[in-house]
Image: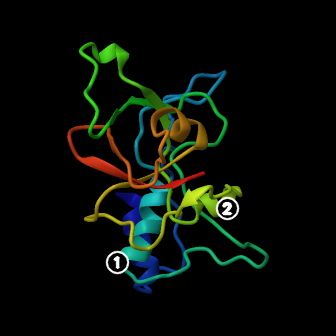
Amino acid sequence: GAVTAAVDAVLAGEAASAFCAVRPPGHHAEAEHAMGFCLFHNIAIGAQRARALHGLTRVAAIPGVRASGLTNQLPLTRGSMILSFGIEGRPRPADPQDMPRASLSIVSQGYAEAMGFTLRGGRLFGSQDRAGTTPVALVNASLASQYFPKGAVGGRLQMVGDTPIDVVGVV
């Protein structure tokens, strides 16, 4: 929509700047807290387009900034997406209510560094992790120890559908 058109226009030199009045993720919010079911953030889509289609390696370059990343969910806020998941190679519970659940945040390369996460094993997201490749995940140490007692890196999660998601790092 508007954000991708603005990115294209500015980077093609057709416009010096652009402003888009778009709704943020969680625009279904209530007065007391953020919530919602928007999976994609318009700005993240625009940034990804600038990187993927226009070859930009740094979308924002501000003096003093050491890392930047994008997410669909503000840290430590209510209303995060909670999804059921399975562990590849383990039977799924007969009752779907007994499936393990975890909070899901969609983040870009650079998000973990910007948030100051400590890498406890494996790797963080990198340029190799993009659309069209095997989906990958970082899991926190709590989930890793509870569901992968022999080590989470190299394990596979089953979330939506049957596409496995490779665990590449523990934070």
- Residue drawn at 41 percent across, 25 percent down: 100
Question: For the residue labelled by badge 1, is the local secondary structure a helix, a strand or a loop?
Answer: loop
**Where does the image place residue 159, in percent across and percent down from the top left?**
32, 38
**How many numbered callouts?**
2
User: In the orientation shown, which residue stands out farthest toward the front?
Assistant: 150
Q: Quadrant of the N terminus?
A: bottom left
Q: Nearer the viewer, mark 2 or mark 1?
A: 2
Q: Which mark is residue 33?
A: none
Q: With 5 as the anchor, is 60 left or right in this view?
A: right
Amino acid type of the residue that numbered disc 2 sits on in the rendered structure: Ala
**Where does the image place residue 6, in percent across and percent down from the top left?**
43, 69
* 170 and 75: which is toward the camera: 170
Residue that mark 1 sits on:
53
In the displayed structure, 120 sits above or below 53; it is above
- Residue drawn at 36 percent across, 32 percent down: 85
Residue that mark 2 sits on:
114
- Residue drawn at 27 percent across, 47 percent down: 164
- Sequence-first disc among 2 and 1: 1
Q: Residues within 10 Å of mark 2 (few under 14, many from 20)?
A: some
Q: Which of the 4 image quadrants contains residue 32?
A: top right
User: In the orientation shown, which residue stands out farthest toward the right?
Assistant: 64
Question: For the residue labelled by badge 2, is the local secondary structure a helix, a strand or a loop?
Answer: helix
C-alpha gap between disc 2 and disc 1: 24 Å
Q: With 46 as the anchor, is 19 left or right in this view?
A: right
Amino acid type of the residue that numbered disc 1 sits on in the rendered structure: Leu
User: In the orientation shown, which residue stands out farthest toward the left?
Assistant: 162
